[in-house]
Image (spheres, helix red, strand yellow):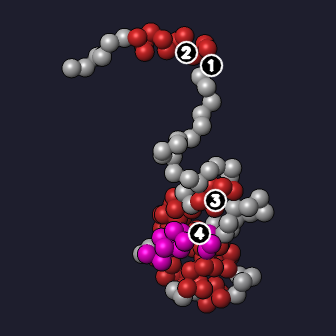
Amino acid sequence: MTSAQLRQLANLLLPGDEAGLPQGSLVPDVMLALAESSSPIKALVGSHPDFADAKKRTAVLSSLEQSHPQDFRDLVLSLIKPYYESGPVLEAMGWRSAPPQPTGHAIAPMDAELSQALARVAARKRMWR
């Protein structure tokens, strides 16, 4: 597969949206995972003559999903983790992209009812040696 085909495939699998989620080709970790993938879907897409036509790409990918469901699923799953852990995607979803340490993430305070329910658990001694 050429680098242009890899970018096109990444954008078909992870298209982004108007709300600010970036396309898959704009996330370096996604492109690295896709480039290193040994998925047969990559080879089939790269050798398919209709993939060069922008109007037919979606149909090509849909037909490969139907004919090779497990391979397609494995490829998508290998890209989802790096996509949703990337800084731009986290920020587009309203999360902060900074590491959780040392300042940590702000969490809502525990309500009084839950504090009372857990008081007995917090007060007990260690249960192991």
Using the numbered discs, state the Cα–Cα distance from disc 2 to disc 4 in whole angstroms.
Answer: 42 Å
Quadrant of image for the C terminus:
top left
Secondary structure at numbered mark 3? helix
Residue 118 magenta: no
Tell which of 40 and 8 is nearer to you: 8
Q: CA distance from mark 2 to mark 1?
A: 6 Å
Residue 117 visible at all: yes
Res. 21 mark: none
Q: Earlier in the sequence, mark 1 or mark 4?
A: 4
Identified at 69% across, 61% down, the residue is: 21
Categorize mark 1 by other alpha carbons within 10 Å: few (<14), some (14-19), many (20+). Answer: few
Q: What's the distance in space between the residues labelled 3 and 2, CA to CA?
A: 35 Å
Tell us which disc is closer to us: 2 or 4.
2
The residue to which callout 1 is attached is: 111
Give the secondary structure at mark 4.
loop
**Gap between marks 1 and 4 measured at Cα:** 39 Å
Q: Position of residue 86 (x, y in %)?
A: 56, 60
Name which residue lies at 57% across and 16% down.
114
